[in-house]
Image: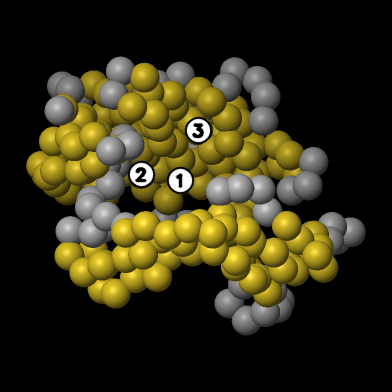
Amino acid sequence: MRKFRTSPTSHSAGTCSAGSETDYLGTLTGSVTVTTGLKGLKLSDAKATFSTPNSLQVEAACVPPLACSFASWGGGLGASKTAPVAAGIAAGTPGHLVHFTDVTRQVSLPAPAGATRTDGAEVRATAPVFNSTAKSLTVKGLASGMVTGAGVISGAKLVLPGTETCTLEGTTYTQTSTAYDEASWKSSTQFVASTILTGTLKVATTGAGEFVNITLKK
């Protein structure tokens, strides 16, 4: 639940490939309550203030420029919606990428209707290794720590290439992607996340997987 009040101090036109947008900067105050469903944990503030910058966007059918994507992967997919899954993503800029691995699960909350909570942990990890001959991706967590494990995604039944123009931090790139879908997942070391709040989450050692390889060029 949240109730916010915005007091604009300046405004500017947003960037749209079609339509229009006005961006307002200013102060944001109000009250906020976060429903976690975790016993003994309550997050609320009746007089919340937020550090700058605070912004409000008012748009009229604005179509923003396509944002660049990053290489990503997922494993242990296809089980129940509440089963833990492993995933990873790259972030940063070309030549300066960092890689993250996480284990998460989705929990349905009793109220309000449709509310969910995502449990899990994320760590910085080594870059996945793509085998261009086998069309497989080897992924890892940490050897020890909050997220551990190692596995391989291979045997994709659906391979989808693509090329498009995108923007990242104000720079335009040509994005070349290849998605490997409907693949198999097998972990040589089970992926496990351990946190104080959510306990131990274990990902299935076999199942479905997928990954996307992406390169960006100016």
Q: Along the horizontal axis of the image, is 46 left or right of 85?
A: right
In this figure, which residue is indicated by the disc labeled 1?
A: 76
Q: Quadrant of the C terminus?
A: top left
In this figure, which residue is indicated by the disc labeled 2?
A: 209
Residue 144 percent across, percent down from the top left? 65, 20
Which residue ends up furthest to the right in the rendered image? Answer: 40
Q: Decide: few, some or many residues near mark 3? Use Cα within 10 Å; few <14, some 14-19, many ≥20.
A: many
Task: Judge depth for marks 1 and 3 and give the one in front.
Answer: 3
Q: Along the horizontal axis of the image, is 98 left or right of 145?
A: left
The amino acid type, in three-letter code, at marker 3 is Thr
Q: Considering the numbered disc 3 on the image, is that residue within a helix, a strand or a loop?
A: strand
Depicted 64 relative to depicted 87: above or below = below
The amino acid type, in three-letter code, at marker 1 is Gly
Q: Nearer the viewer, residue 104 or 25?
A: 25
Q: Nearer the viewer, residue 83 or 62?
A: 62
In this figure, which residue is indicated by the disc labeled 3?
A: 101
Residue 213 percent across, percent down from the top left? 24, 34
Q: CA distance from mark 2 to mark 3?
A: 14 Å
Q: CA distance from mark 2 to mark 1?
A: 6 Å
Task: Judge depth for marks 2 and 3 and give the one in front.
Answer: 3
Residue 101 percent across, percent down from the top left? 50, 33
Does the image show residue 206?
no
